[in-house]
C-alpha cells in the first residue's frame, strides 16, 4: 500500500480510477475504508485519492497534540508530493473541517469543496454542546474506546436493518489507537476558520443529514456566508451519511462535481 512521508509522519493513501483528482477526507476515528460505498461510483469518473489522516488507519500515530491546522498541512504536503494540482475535496465531519482549513490556507490546491455533516468551527457556546463533548471525554477516559464505540454505533445506525453497518462500524473503530483518537478529538474542540470562509471563491456544496448531530439550521447559517454555495439535505440520514444513504449521497456529490469539472486535469504521480 502506498505511503508518503510528509514532515514527521508516513501517510497511507490510495489512488483509484482516472480523471480529475478527487480527494476524500474521512472523519474522526475513521479511515480510507469508510469510503468503500463511494469508490466504485466516483472512480469511474475521477482519480480518487483517499488518505488516512495522521493518528488514523494505516498512517503513523505520533505523540500529540494534534490540530486541524496540522492535519491540513499534512494533506497539502501529500498533494504537492503527488503533484496533483488543484483537487476536488470531499470531507465528512472532521474531514470537512480539514477541507475548510486546506481551502483557506492553500487555495491553489482546491478546485471545489463538498462539506458533509460539518462546519467551519467547533466553538462550544451552549451547555448542550459542552455536555456532548464532555461526555465523549468522560466515556473515553473512564470506560475506554470500546464503550465509546458502542454508544456511537447505536446513535449512527439505530435501525434494526442496520445491524451489519453497526457491526462494521464497531469492528473498524475498535482498531483505533485510544491515545491518538483522544488527540484528534481534542484537535477539534475550539477550532475555527469561520472568520475566513467568506473569502473562499471555489464552488462549495454543503451536504447535511436531516438527523445530523447539529441541525440543518446550523448549516444554513454558515452557507449564507459562502459565495454561491449550495446546501443539500439528505433525508432519513444521520451523521454517517455516505454509509447510511450511499446511493443518494453519491448522486448528490457526482451531480455537483459534474457541474464544476473540466478536462485537462493532471494525473497523480506515483508515491513513495
Image (tube, rainbow, N blue to C red):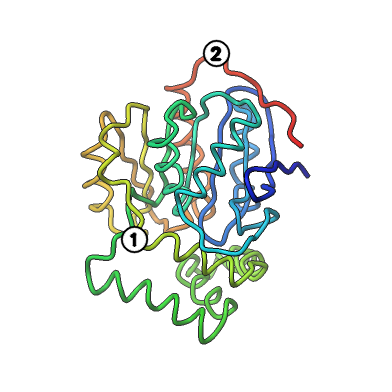
- Residue 62 percent coordinates (x, y): 63, 60
Viewer-proximal residue, 135 or 6?
6
Q: In this view, does 153 lie above or below 260?
A: below
Q: Is mark 1 in CB contact (under 8 Å) with mark 2?
A: no
In the rendered image, the vertical position of residue 173 relative to residue 106, given as above or below: below
Of residues 106 and 133, the one nearer the viewer is 106
Mark pair 1, 2: CA separation? 39 Å
- Image position of 61 (left or right of 213): right
Task: Write down the residue under mark 2.
Answer: 263
Q: Which residue is drawn at 55% across and 13% down?
A: 263
Look at the numbered disc 1 and give the secondary structure of its residue. loop
Q: Is residue 245 depicted above or below 204 in this figure?
A: below
- Residue at 49% of width from left, 71% of height from top? 152
Quadrant the C terminus occupies: top right
Quadrant of the image occupied by residue 55:
bottom right
Relative to 23, is 168 on the left or the right?
A: right
* Residue found at the very far front of the displayed protein: 8
Residue drawn at the location 34% of the way across and 46% of the way down: 233
Which quarter of the rendered picture does the N terminus lie within? Answer: top right
Question: x and y percent of residue 58 in the render?
Answer: 70, 55
Q: Residue 201 bears which disc, if any?
A: none
Q: In this view, does 86 lie above or below 170?
A: above
Q: What is the quadrant of residue 174 in the picture?
A: bottom right
Of marks 1 and 2, which one's residue comes earlier in the chain?
A: 1
Instruction: Give the camera-side residue of 68 and 245.
Output: 68
Q: Characterize the local packing of mark 2: few (<14), some (14-19) or many (20 or more) Cα atoms within 10 angstroms.
A: few
Q: Which one is in front, 116 or 161?
A: 116
Residue 26 lies, in percent from the top left, at 54, 50
Q: Residue at x 30, y 33 (%)?
A: 229
According to the image, label 1 marks what residue? 190
**Residue depth check, mark 1 versus mark 2: number of the one nearer the observer:** 1
Amino acid at each position: 500500500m502506498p505511503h508518503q512521508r510528509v514532515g514527521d509522519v508516513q501517510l497511507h493513501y490510495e489512488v483509484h480510477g482516472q480523471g480529475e483528482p478527487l480527494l476524500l477526507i474521512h472523519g474522526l476515528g475513521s479511515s480510507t475504508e469508510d469510503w468503500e460505498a463511494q469508490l466504485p461510483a466516483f472512480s469511474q469518473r475521477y482519480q480518487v485519492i483517499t488518505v488516512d489522516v495522521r493518528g488514523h488507519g494505516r498512517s503513523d500515530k505520533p505523540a500529540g497534540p494534534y490540530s486541524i491546522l496540522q492535519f491540513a498541512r499534512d494533506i497539502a504536503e501529500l498533494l504537492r508530493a503527488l503533484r496533483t494540482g488543484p483537487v476536488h475535496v470531499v470531507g465528512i465531519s472532521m474531514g470537512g473541517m480539514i477541507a475548510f482549513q486546506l481551502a483557506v490556507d492553500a487555495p491553489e490546491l482546491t478546485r471545489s469543496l463538498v462539506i458533509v455533516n460539518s462546519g467551519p468551527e467547533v466553538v462550544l457556546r451552549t451547555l448542550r454542546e459542552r455536555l456532548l463533548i464532555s461526555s465523549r471525554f468522560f466515556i473515553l477516559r473512564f470506560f475506554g474506546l470500546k464503550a465509546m464505540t458502542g454508544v456511537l454505533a447505536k446513535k449512527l445506525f439505530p435501525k434494526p436493518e442496520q445491524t451489519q453497518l453497526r457491526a462494521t462500524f464497531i469492528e473498524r473503530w475498535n482498531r483505533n489507537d485510544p491515545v491518538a483518537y483522544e488527540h484528534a478529538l481534542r484537535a477539534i474542540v475550539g477550532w475555527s476558520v469561520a472568520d475566513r470562509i467568506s473569502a473562499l471563491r471555489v464552488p462549495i456544496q454543503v451536504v447535511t443529514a436531516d438527523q445530523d448531530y447539529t441541525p440543518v439550521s446550523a448549516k444554513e447559517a454558515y452557507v449564507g456566508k459562502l459565495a454561491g454555495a449550495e446546501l443539500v439535505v439528505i433525508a432519513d440520514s444521520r451523521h454517517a451519511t455516505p454509509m447510511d444513504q450511499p446511493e443518494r449521497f453519491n448522486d448528490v456529490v457526482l451531480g455537483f462535481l459534474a457541474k464544476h469539472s473540466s478536462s485537462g486535469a493532471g494525473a497523480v504521480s506515483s508515491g513513495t
